[in-house]
């Protein structure tokens, strides 16, 4: 279905370096990038352009616009968000969505990779000592930095700083003008190898989902759409909040499959039972 077809990777941040090798090897596609396409029109991490859509809708719009401009019927785009982990509130997370669109066959496959592997951070600094301490903490210079007047200031931003001299110069310029400097990690993929690793993992997950075909119509993208809780406690046989089954639904023929005991467990330890361990 995909072999030898051209696939557009909608990015201006060099994500093709980790996405293309996996897709070309696993799907047989021929990847390319439109260097003139500006994905920042849908939002920037530094806030000059606010992202108006949710991450999935943004990735979809990014992909479809690029495909239309290039008259291509096969494309992929990603969108990342950074902030507190949804369940571990004191830990920052990288939340990456990848979307694969085939308009020829009416296929859309979406995956999410939520990872605590991120150096996402920011801090107001008053001197070079504080600046360099922050830089060491976030793995500079292998990971880029951004300097600006303050956290919410969207003008006079120095991006993509990856060497010590440029870091010193940018700090001195801003501090002399504003008597305050905010330093943060540059989360654009080409300046953040840690984020690039998460995108690579998301791509591997995407390929697995594409290769998962519906048992009834054989269309790609047959993936988990829901999870049922209720795995029984081994001591009381009462339902727990642990996963009992996964639900798969084909987006083409609506075939439904329920996979019982997906983690190869037919009972749960009483430790995780609300009755045994309230």
Image (cartoon, rainbow, N blue to C red):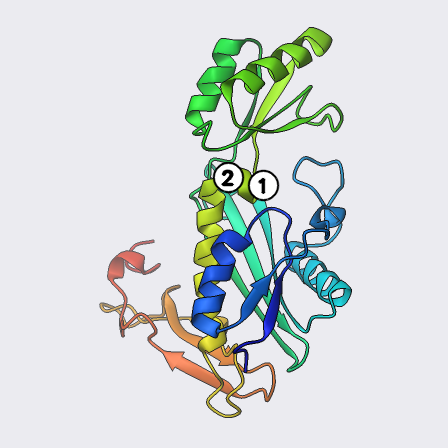
9 to the left or right of 237: right
Helix, strand or loop under label 2: loop
Callouts 2 and 1 close, C-beta under 8 Å:
yes
Label number found at residue 188: 1
Name which residue lies at 49% across and 86% down. 214
Q: Position of residue 105 (x, y in %)?
A: 64, 82
Query: Can the viewer see residue 208?
Result: no
Name which residue lies at 68% across and 14% down. 174
Looking at the image, residue 176 lies above or below residue 244:
above
Query: Can the viewer see residue 88?
Result: yes
Q: Position of residue 102 (x, y in %)?
A: 63, 75
95 to the left or right of 136: right
Looking at the image, residue 226 lies above or below residue 141:
below
Helix, strand or loop under label 1: loop
How crowded pointer 1 is (Cα within 10 Å; few <14, some 14-19, many 20+) is rated as many
Residue farthest to the left, as pictured: 235
Q: Position of residue 246 (x, y in %)?
A: 43, 75
109 to the left or right of 230: right
Front-most of 236 and 96?
96
Name which residue lies at 48% across and 73% down. 27
Q: Which residue is mark 2?
A: 192
């Amino acid at each position: 279905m995909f072999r030898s077809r051209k696939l557009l990777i909608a990015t201006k941040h060099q994500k093709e370096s980790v996405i293309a090798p996996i897709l070309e090897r696993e799907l047989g596609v021929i990847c390319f990038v439109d260097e003139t396409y500006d994905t920042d029109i849908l939002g920037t991490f530094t806030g000059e352009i606010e992202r108006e859509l949710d991450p999935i809708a943004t990735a979809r719009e990014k992909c479809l616009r690029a495909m239309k401009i290039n008259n291509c019927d096969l494309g992929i785009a990603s969108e990342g968000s950074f902030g507190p982990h949804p369940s571990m509130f004191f830990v920052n997370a990288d939340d990456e969505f990848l979307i694969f669109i085939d308009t020829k066959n009416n296929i859309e496959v979406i995956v999410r990779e939520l990872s605590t592997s991120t150096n996402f951070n920011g801090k107001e600094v008053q001197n070079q000592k504080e600046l360099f301490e922050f830089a060491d903490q976030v793995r500079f210079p292998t990971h880029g930095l951004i300097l600006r007047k303050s956290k919410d200031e969207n003008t006079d931003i120095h991006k993509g700083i990856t060497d010590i001299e440029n870091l010193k110069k940018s700090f001195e310029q801003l501090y002399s003008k504003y008597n305050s400097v905010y330093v943060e990690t540059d989360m654009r993929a080409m300046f953040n190898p840690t984020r690039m690793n998460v995108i690579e993992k998301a791509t591997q997950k995407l390929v697995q989902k594409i290769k998962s075909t519906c048992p009834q119509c054989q269309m790609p993208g047959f993936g988990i759409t829901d999870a049922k809780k209720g795995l029984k406690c081994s001591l009381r046989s009462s339902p727990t909040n642990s996963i009992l089954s996964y639900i798969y639904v084909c987006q083409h023929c609506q075939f439904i499959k329920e996979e019982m005991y997906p983690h190869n467990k037919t009972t749960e330890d009483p430790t995780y039972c609300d009755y045994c361990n309230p």
